[in-house]
Image (spheres, grey):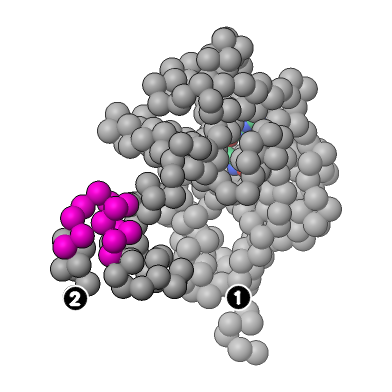
Amino acid sequence: MEKEDKKGTLYIVATPIGNLEDITLRAINVLKEVDLIAAEDTRHTLKLLNHLEISKPLISYHRHNEEIKSDILIEKLQEGKEIALVSDAGTPGICDPGEEIIKKCIDLEINIVPIPGACAMINSLICSGIDTKEFTFLGFLPLNKKLRKSKLDEIEKSKKTIIIYEAPHKIETTLKDLKQILNSERKITLAREITKIHEEFIRGNIDDLIEKSQGIKGEIVLVIEGNADISEENELTKLSIEEHYKYYENLGLSKKEIIKKIAKDRNVNKNEVYQKFI
Ligand code: SAM
């Protein structure tokens, strides 16, 4: 048998984000059949496994041991073991550990199989009533002042829907920060405790949300409408000048027209742009 055939498979298994019924038949079968389950918090996953009447060896794989544990797991996969990776809730790799081992598996040509299921980001978006065609997921906003400011700037200028995760004890501060950058036209949906008893969607503008979310508890996702005031020209200035040129070139414009347009979009002198492309 080829050496490659002996390698095991890493299954990335989505688990419920609240309601324990939100697990697929395929996920249950995989959890039953693998040799080992790598879990973010083994005690947490044990509760799910007990509920599903599955008994399997568990190994912890969390943010603080990702580097070491991914090497151990890789070794086992190289030996031909089948492993399922789960997080505490939802889809591993989405604001949860997973990325590290997935990248290593790809480098080592170890097979990875997604087992789709719950994800708070997608379920908040689909019930938000906000444009689902194009969106940007920012995960948790950074706490570091400078990084946070840069993310808030991004939200302010985004034409696309923005999705962020937030912890209940930080939601008040986050909404106050958002108030600084969102105009009252922009819709925002706060999705709380999705799939759980207290599931709730609070919709409105930033002022409505601040008013309606006082003392709110539970797990939260914010879905923010894109900024309709951002014109396409503004978006284009985020590109490098070469990409900007390509954009118009693909539209079939002549060199002269492109240079004129770039100068206008970037608010620079035509000659300055011309110099770049002679
Ligand atoms: N991997 C998960 C997923 O697929 O959505 C996300 C894990 S991240 C560590 C936890 C954050 O996800 C929470 O702080 C909250 O923002 C969001 N979240 C998870 N479960 C949720 C739920 N039932 N309702 C609302 N938000 C939830």
* 200 or 108, nearer to the observer: 200
Whether residue 270 appears in magenta in the rendering, the answer is: yes
Task: Give the residue at x 58% y 27%.
Answer: 188
Q: Nearer the viewer, residue 32 or 234?
A: 234
The N terminus sits in image quarter? bottom right
Question: Residue 123, position in %: x, y?
Answer: 69, 39
**Drawn side of residue 120 relative to residue 159, left or right:** right
- Indicate whether residue 265 is drawn in magenta: yes
Q: Quadrant of residue 82?
A: bottom right
Ligand 1 quadrant assignment = top right
Residue 91 in sight: yes
Element under disc 1: loop
Q: Position of residue 56 (x, y in %)?
A: 72, 51
Q: Amino acid at mark 1?
A: Lys
Q: Is residue 47 left or right of residue 53?
A: left
Q: Quadrant of residue 200?
A: top right
**Magenta region, mostly helix, strand or loop?**
helix
Instruction: Identify residue type, mark 2.
Output: Ile
Q: Is residue 239 above or below residue 155?
A: below
Residue stretch in magenta = 259-271
Q: Is residue 231 above or below residue 77?
A: above
Q: Residues within 10 Å of mark 1 (few under 14, many from 20)?
A: many
- Residue beneath disc 1: 7
Label 2: which residue?
278
Q: CA distance from mark 2 to mark 1?
A: 54 Å
